[in-house]
């Protein structure tokens, strides 16, 4: 196969085209759904085993896109949040991705809230990230693709420098680097 690539490249050079192989990766912000499920399972086990929650109305209800929390009062709700967040953090979920809805009165004398996860890089923040990459003077091209940022370059070392630079930035959202090509 590599011999065929070499022949195609030589042919391309002979005919005046330059065959340039770009390397790329995507900068994303997302959560691992399996780790969230594992963290919720651990939090539910701790909730069932803790003495101070016996007989209280405290629940963690995982749903499709969020996690419902129900408690008797705000104090127990705060404890419930602490249990869940600590378990999620141990599973590698960044707390910057957690977003709580407003506390609402629930059925009877209870309160409820929903915990959601922020995913994707918002357009304005993606533009700011691209601007920082360009200001650094790295020889890469960065462009917004949906809620991700695609970074491409002719040399893999430039991509490595970009990853190191982005990891060093203090961003409002966690980032991950995927789809290396």
Image: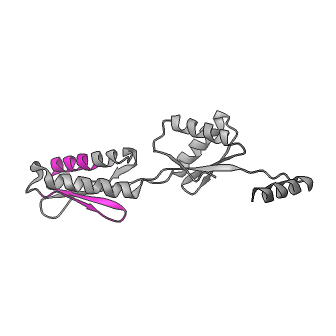
105 or 156, which is in the foreground?
Answer: 156
Residue 177 location in percent, x, y?
Answer: 54, 47
Asked whether residue 73 is drawn in magenta, I would say yes
Q: Is residue 6 visible?
A: yes
Q: Please state, as top left, top right, bottom left or bottom right, where the N terminus lies in the image.
A: bottom right
Name the residue: 81% across, 54% down: 6
Query: Furthest residue to the left?
Result: 55
Look at the picture and state if 38 lies above or below 156.
below
Residue 145 placement, left or right of 17: left
Figure quadrant of residue 82:
top left
Look at the picture and state if 39 lies above or below 172.
below
Name the residue: 84% across, 51% down: 18
Residue 102 location in percent, x, y?
Answer: 29, 54
Q: Which residues are magenta?
A: 57-84
Figure quadrant of residue 38:
bottom left
Look at the picture and state if 41 lies above or below 134.
below
Name the residue: 68% across, 49% down: 23
20 or 166, which is in the foreground?
Answer: 20
45 or 141, which is in the foreground?
Answer: 45
Name the residue: 52% across, 34% down: 168
Q: Is residue 101 visible?
A: no
Residue 143 placement, left or right of 66: right
Residue 181 location in percent, x, y?
Answer: 64, 52
Residue 106 location in percent, x, y?
Answer: 19, 61
């Amino acid at each position: 196969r590599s011999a065929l690539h070499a022949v195609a490249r030589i042919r391309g050079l002979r005919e005046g085209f330059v065959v340039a192989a770009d390397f790329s990766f995507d900068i994303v912000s997302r959560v691992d759904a399996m780790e969230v499920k594992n963290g919720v399972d651990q939090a539910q086990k701790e909730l069932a085993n803790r003495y101070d929650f016996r007989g209280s109305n405290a629940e963690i209800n995982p749903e499709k896109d969020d996690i419902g929390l129900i408690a008797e009062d705000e104090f127990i709700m705060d404890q419930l949040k602490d249990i869940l967040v600590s378990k999620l953090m141990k599973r590698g979920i960044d707390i910057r991705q957690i977003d709580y809805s407003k506390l609402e009165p629930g059925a009877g004398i209870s309160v409820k809230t929903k915990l959601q996860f922020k995913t994707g890089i918002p357009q304005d923040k993606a533009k700011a990230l691209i601007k920082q990459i360009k200001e650094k003077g790295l020889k890469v091209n960065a462009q917004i693709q949906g809620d991700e940022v695609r970074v491409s370059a002719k040399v893999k070392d430039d991509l490595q420098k970009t990853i190191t630079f982005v990891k060093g930035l203090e961003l409002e959202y966690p980032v991950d680097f995927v789809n290396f090509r």
